[in-house]
Image (cartoon, coloured by chain):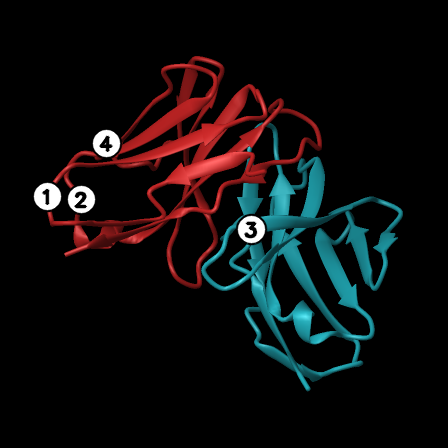
Chain colours: A red, B cyan
Amino acid sequence: DAMVIQNPRYQVTQFGKPVTLSCSQTLNHNVMYWYQQKSSQAPKLLFHYYDKDFNNEADTPDNFQSRRPNTSFCFLDIRSPGLGDAAMYLCATSRELAGADTQYFGPGTRLTVL
Amino acid sequence: RKEVEQDPGPFNVPEGATVAFNCTYSNSASQSFFWYRQDCRKEPKLLMSVYSSGNEDGRFTAQLNRASQYISLLIRDSKLSDSATYLCVVRGDYKLSFGAGTTVTVRA
């Protein structure tokens, strides 16, 4: 059974049209992460939630926002997608932040911006 | 300088061969180390953790050299199913830093 679910798997949006990506987890983990991965590049952490505490990476553009209404769900909002935002967006969870805790990844949402 | 650097490859090897590759990391305070595997257009999946004394998991052997700040992965008796991109991952205080990956292609 899938433990980290992302919807939709493929998303097409127009330049400048807001889009929301969804992630849910059945693991009851405290931490949820959003990564952006462009072709042949490393996944880049955008932000994470520890419970309800939001932590933004310093170089994450303001165009990217996130919401976590409850333990199970986390959303990535892209307010005005540009062509450079086309990428795979990966959601991940972990039980805790510290130590050698494993991160579990969802299958990703591939975003295309026209 | 990138936090984690890897040779992108590709490493093209025949079935049954041994292939090995490294990555280097810049933060000497890094606490934990991992190898993840990523298939084309799929999510990364944990392959194995890397321990200070080195560790094996079947045909995979990982080594850590803290003094030189590098991590290695060796795959013995390569299978076609080992074809993938291998991501070197380093944990700092709260987050994982990923390398861009080393691509391995095993041919029949």
Kindly report which numbered mark, 2 or 4, lies closer to the viewer in this rendering.
2
Residue B16 lies left or right of residue A44; in this view the side is right
Residue B19 position within the rendered picture, expressed as x and y whole percent measured from the top left: 75, 74
Residue A32 lies left or right of residue B68; in this view the side is left
Amino acid on which disc 1 is placed: Gly
Numbered tag placed on residue A62 in the rendering: 4
Q: Quadrant of residue B93?
A: top right
Numbered tag placed on residue B15 in the rendering: none
Amino acid on which disc 2 is placed: Pro
Q: Are marks 1 and 2 in contact (CB under 8 Å)?
A: yes
Residue A25 position within the rendered picture, expressed as x and y whole percent measured from the top left: 50, 28
Q: Are marks 2 and 4 in contact (CB under 8 Å)?
A: no
Q: What's the CA distance linking mark 1 and mark 2?
A: 5 Å
Residue B45 position (above or below residue B59):
above
Q: What's the CA distance linking mark 3 and mark 4?
A: 26 Å
| Residue on which the image places disc 3 | B44
Going by the picture, which residue comes out furthest to the front? A1
Q: Report the quarter where the C terminus of chain A lies.
A: bottom left
| Residue on which the image places disc 1 | A16
Amino acid on which disc 4 is placed: Asp
* Residue at position x 56%, y 51% in the image: B44
Q: What's the CA distance linking mark 2 and mark 4?
A: 11 Å
Q: Residue B18 or B78: which is nearer the viewer? A: B78
Q: Are marks 1 and 2 on the same chain?
A: yes
| Residue on which the image places disc 2 | A81
